[in-house]
Image (spheres, rainbow, N blue to C red):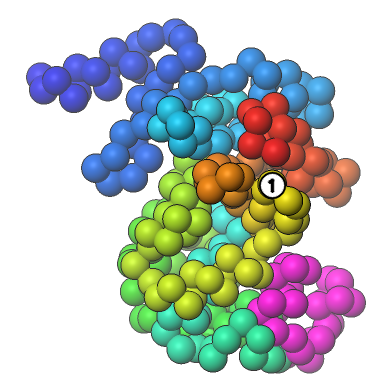
């Protein structure tokens, strides 16, 4: 048995706070469980996981590491990658190009408008991003996802649904690694596309920090899976994070962002 496999087997047998996981091909990162995060989830009364990269220690700090490695449909968190791919392949000229929503009734009146990606990502407009996916097309979408190394890289045959109800899936750990590379400019895409996505994901900016993020809610499974992913940039240091929770109803889904912010605060990122 190789040294790597011996260590992996040992890590799976240990009952403790550190596990060894693969964060990306060829990379390994320690996952440290946090009692403070567990307490935050208990106070919120939700089931799920939170993961943040501690760049100083090159360690992933997490609640529920096993779930953190489990893949789920990315839902609207895929709008980040969808934007990158659309810009990179020229399906849209910029995040300010107006795209049609299609004219059909939508679950939310705010979605029933033609709008730019800059506007659409803020209100998580599904039909506008479905239009973007159709413009990209299956071959370019698959090539883009392969290039980004996003999740399980499976998109099936329906170009405008695969992130909502499969087959594309991604884990919280994989979200963190993808966002780390995006925030650091390490993805194999143009600087212009990266900068545009940085701009439209910015949710809060203070004198000391920036918070970038995107929510998602996979509603085609029971219970639903609610996401909030992003990164904090403070003093030149990047803290990528990902939260997902079971979301059986609107009230639970509303806890995604507050709980993630509480976790970031407990870990000293916010």
Residue 31 in picture, x, y percent from top left: 45, 26
Q: Which residue is mark 1?
A: 208
Magenta range: 102-127
Residue 147 in picture, x, y percent from top left: 33, 67
Name the image quarter holding residue 7.
top left
Which element type, helix, strand or loop, lies under badge 1?
loop
Residue furthest to the left: 1
Number of numbered discs visible in the structure rendering: 1
Which of the two residues, 182 or 158, is positioned nearer the viewer here? 182
In the rendered image, the quadrant that contains the N terminus is top left
From what the image shows, is residue 38 above or below residue 229?
A: above
Seen at 67% across and 53% down, the residue is 210
Seen at 43% across and 73% down, the residue is 191
Seen at 45% across and 31% down, the residue is 56
Residue 120 in picture, x, y percent from top left: 72, 76
**Viewed as shown, does residue 167 lie left or right of 223?**
left
């Amino acid at each position: 048995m190789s040294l790597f496999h011996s260590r992996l087997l040992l890590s799976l047998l240990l009952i403790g706070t550190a596990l060894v996981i693969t964060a990306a091909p060829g990379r390994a990162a320690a996952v440290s469980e946090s009692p403070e995060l567990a307490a935050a989830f208990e106070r919120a009364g939700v089931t799920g996981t939170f993961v943040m990269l501690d760049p100083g220690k090159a360690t992933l700090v997490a609640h529920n590491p096993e779930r953190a490695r489990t893949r789920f449909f990315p839902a609207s968190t895929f709008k980040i990658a969808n934007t990158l791919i659309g810009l990179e392949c020229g399906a849209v000229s910029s995040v300010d190009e107006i795209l049609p929503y299609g004219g059909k009734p939508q679950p939310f009146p705010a979605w029933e408008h033609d709008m730019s990606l800059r506007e659409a990502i803020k209100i998580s407009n599904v039909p506008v991003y479905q239009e973007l996916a159709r413009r990209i097309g299956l071959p370019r979408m698959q090539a883009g996802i392969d290039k980004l190394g996003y999740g399980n890289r499976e998109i099936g045959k329906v170009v405008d649904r695969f992130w909502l109800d499969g087959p594309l899936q991604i884990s919280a750990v994989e979200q963190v690694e993808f966002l780390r590379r995006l925030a650091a400019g390490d993805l194999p895409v143009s600087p212009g596309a990266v900068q545009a996505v940085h701009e439209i994901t910015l949710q809060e900016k203070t004198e000391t920090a920036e918070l970038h993020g995107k929510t998602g809610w996979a509603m085609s499974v029971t219970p639903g899976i609610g996401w909030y992913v992003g990164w904090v940039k403070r003093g030149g240091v990047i803290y990528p994070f990902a939260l997902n929770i079971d979301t059986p109803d609107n009230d639970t889904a509303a806890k995604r962002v507050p709980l993630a912010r509480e976790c970031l605060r407990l870990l000293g990122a916010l």
